Amino acid sequence: MDSLDFTDATHGWVLAGDLLATSDGGATWTDITPTAAMAVRRPGPTTPISDMTAAQGLSPTSGEPRGTAPTIHPSPSPGVQTALGFDIGQVLCKPYPNCSTQQSINNMLAWANSGPYLATSLYLPSPNHLTDHYLTSTWVTAIQQQGWGLIPIWVGRQSPCACKPNSGTYPNCSLFNPLIGPDVAGAQSQGTADATTAEGVASGLVLSGVAIIYKNLENYDPASVLPGGATCGSVVNAYLSSWDTKLHADFYSAGVYGNPIPAVDWQAHVSPLPDDAWIAQYPATGKAPAVTIWGIGTAYKMTDAMWPSYQRIHQYTNTHSEAWGNTSSFGIDGDIVNAEIVSNNNMTNYTYGYSNIDCTNLGALSVSPAAINDMSNGTLITGPGQMGTIVGSFNDSNYHWHGFQNVGGTCSSIDFPGAMDTFVYGINNLSQIVGYWYDGTNYHGFLKNPGSTPTQLNCLGGISTFYGINDASQIVGFAQFSNDVGQAFLYYKGQCYPVGSKSATGYTLAYGINGDATVTGDAPYSFEESLLPPSWTGTATPVVPGGNSSAYANAINANNELVGYYPSSACMNTDNVCGFLSTDNVVLTLLTYGNFPVTNAFGINDFGQIVGFYQDSLGNEHAALWAPQ
């Protein structure tokens, strides 16, 4: 039994897998579970999510009719998008309200062409939210034509014990208006009515392709007891149950936005389960944001097995100012999306500038940059002209290799203690660095945490080399078992998971990983593989940008933009290579450097900044940064 509440001496409600009600003090119970006889896009199973252990390998939505066995890691529905997004309460328009719909449309186009974001929130007009004068059907149509993915969200009624910001703690605080409840029966009818209204508002905005609406729930304590005796959690869950049921009946998916504690302790027990979860978890003061959908909410017992299959949005920063494309600055929250939204793609104008980033202060003979994160001098990039932290390796005058870190144009060396050579290949926003070192005989992988000495790590019993790391501290690399046999792996929370297949005479190499745990590498042909906990098995997809099967895929970012290199006639002759940027095997741009077209791209951050090298007319290689303009 998940929860039991009575609104008076005779009327009660219990959630025990199914939703039951009584009107005689519990002598008899009636099953009021919403009917399963509906065509639902992605219904949740009847089993509470807390019972779905990692060992079972189950996902909290199954793609099967309610009551059947869930499938393992279903393929994403057509509305699923993998992208960076931003959340803003009103459209991009300043000074508000003395601007215009067209000004906002122009601002959105500037952000599309210059910023990193492919999706944005869409606050449907509702109670408990400011009226947005410029959110019209004209605006929505124009934004969709620009290519934006949209995340429809309905604020509406809030928990009966949710306090307005900075107003105290329940019950001694200012409450929202209107509220859910005040009892279970009232909440049930409200959930159905509000879902109907939200659907109508979305339709009125001519929102093309809408298939999901997220219910906003500001933070509340689910255990708080209301005057009638019910808990806030039970009342909100009754509302969500009806909200989900109504949306499913009308062929929508149902999402929920909120904080980890209510999501884990209560919302994960709603029947039917919300199809997608949008979780707000921000970094501690002074800490870097984790641009990933995994490992979030761990302090609140949220596990990777909850909503694992293309069902997560992580709001990784709270309100801060950003400006793109010469617009005014706007206060936004940052989101990484791997969930169902009103998806749209292929909108970014890929115009790149380039610059030399050789580490001249280290006296390097050659420099090989390998990765770049989203942090500019210790803070998240918020506009053009800022450069992420770069890592890689350089060769000294004695022909030994050292790792380096480039912060704001200044390079410092990184060495594994006692190593003959040190190679650095990956960095995340938390300044964790990975690579491998050479002892004169073998190579060994390592992880370096900020301010600490590198620590050796090994995977799968082979000689390990580490290449990429994301903000969930998921690391990819390669374990070699003999001269010709090896296996790519993903290292996470002390466990090693094979990536791709291994044969008696073959190998796979994993080079890059993004915040969604999509891995790139070669086997020996380049591939992408989408990995999902808890089983960490995915399907490898060949990377053939522009139909070129000789491509090598080196890195991938949160927008699924992939960089690497392949032979091209654009690079002097077919024996030389060009760095490329692509998505969905479509080449978005070839990376050239002035009159020196021979290039190689090794790393890309979530803001589209790319690092690699170019070759000058004498055949010398130089470190390069390509940045969107």
Image (cartoon, rainbow, N blue to C red):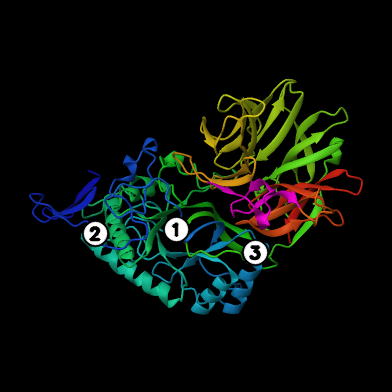
How many residues crowd around disc 3 within 10 Å: few (fewer than 14), some, or many (20 or more)? many
The residue depicted at 78 percent of the width and 40 percent of the height is 368
Q: Look at the picture and state if 14 lies above or below 175.
A: above
Dots 1, 3 in contact, CB < 8 A: no
Residue 157 highlighted magenta (yes or no): no
Q: Which residue is mark 3?
A: 348
Residue range highlighted in magenta: 540-567
Residue 547 highlighted magenta (yes or no): yes
How many residues crowd around disc 2 within 10 Å: few (fewer than 14), some, or many (20 or more)? some
Q: Secondary structure at mark 1?
A: loop
Q: Which residue is mark 1?
A: 77
Q: Which residue is mark 2?
A: 34
**Distance between the Cα atoms at labels 1 and 3?**
23 Å
Give residue 125's position: percent from left, percent from top. 43, 72
**Distance between the Cα atoms at labels 2 and 3?**
43 Å
Dots 2, 1 in contact, CB < 8 A: no
- Quarter of the image where one finds residue 547: bottom right
- Quarter of the image where one finds residue 203: bottom left
Q: Judge depth for marks 1 and 3 and give the one in front.
A: 1
Would you say residue 382 is visible in this rendering? Answer: no
Amino acid type of the residue tagged 2 in the rendering: Pro
